[in-house]
Image (cartoon, rainbow, N blue to C red):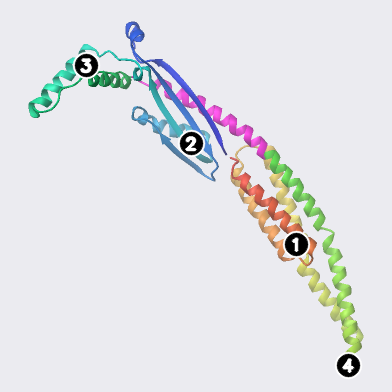
Amino acid sequence: MTGYASAQHSSASAQSEHEAKAGPVSQLGLEIRAVNSRFLDLSFRLPEELRQFEPVLRDLLVSRLKRGKVEVRASIESSAQSLVAEPTPRLLQRLNAVQDSVKAWLPQASGLSVADVIRLSSNEQASHRDWSPDIVPLAEKVLSALLGAREREGARLASMLLDRITQLRALAAQAVPLVPKLVEQQRQRFLERWAEAMSLADGSTLPEMAADRALTEATAFAIRIDVAEEITRLSSHLDELERLLQRGGEIGKRLDFLIQELHREANTLGSKSAALELTHISVDMKVLIEQMREQVQNLE
């Protein structure tokens, strides 16, 4: 089932009051996208600072999602990217020590520029932010919004499926009276052909035997084209589909199975068809069932 949700969380990257006023503000952004899939397929696109939270996020999603191709994206934006970050004395001391160590081995190496120091200072401040208290609550908020969107879509899909069920019932009702009519037509046709054949024969075959043979052929034909069993099973599957849609919950995989059974009965109905009307009904049924199959894969 498709869906999209996102949220952001902002906080100061420093802890002390003085640093909170001077330090950059970081913003954590999280979004979850979901598209149709028969199974649950998770993918994560996280920055290095948040890579450690992937197992926690995966467990959270698995506990509340059952189907769909789901992508989780996170980003960290800091005001330090647009503001000049002032390096701390401790950082300057460490950079100077590292530079002296590098020059001891590589005398021709260029020294750090002011731009290098400012860039390293910004990275240092951004990397010190601990997102562990914020990442899970933010993910729960986004996931709840996603589930809400999917629930609303699910209600629309259920309404569409119920409409297709009504149309399939109407087609089945059209097919029921056709079979006895076809049997009676074929019976009369057999009797007429046998009567015509007997009139051309030399009389060696008794008329009663010919009539019995014609009735036997008509009975065999009636058995071959009888679709009452298929119509009964199709109606039973439609009843179960309607019951599941009205009950709700995790019904996607059960609906998949029932759609397969509906398609099988519609195929059998077409293969037994002895009239153009039944063929048309079978084709119309398969069109509706295929539409349902595509949408059922969206339901969880």
Per the rendering, the mark at residue 150 is: none
Disc 1 is placed on an element classified as helix
Nearer the camera: disc 4 or disc 3:
3
Q: CA distance from mark 2 to mark 3?
A: 42 Å
Q: Circle 3 is placed at which residue position?
A: 91
Q: Circle 2 is placed at which residue position?
A: 62
* Earlier sequence position, callout 2 versus callout 4: 2
What is the count of numbered marks? 4
Tell me: residue 262, above or below residue 127: below
* Earlier sequence position, callout 1 versus callout 3: 3
- Quadrant for the C terminus, please: top right
Question: Is the C-beta separation of discs 4 and 1 under 8 Å?
Answer: no
Residue type beneath disc 4? Ser
Residue type beneath disc 2? Val
* Earlier sequence position, callout 4 versus callout 3: 3
Question: Is the C-beta separation of discs 4 and 3 under 8 Å?
Answer: no
Magenta-span inclusion, residue 150: yes
Q: Circle 4 is placed at which residue position?
A: 204
Q: CA distance from mark 4 to mark 1?
A: 41 Å
Q: CA distance from mark 1 to mark 3?
A: 81 Å
Tell me: residue 160, above or below residue 93: below
The magenta segment is 129-157
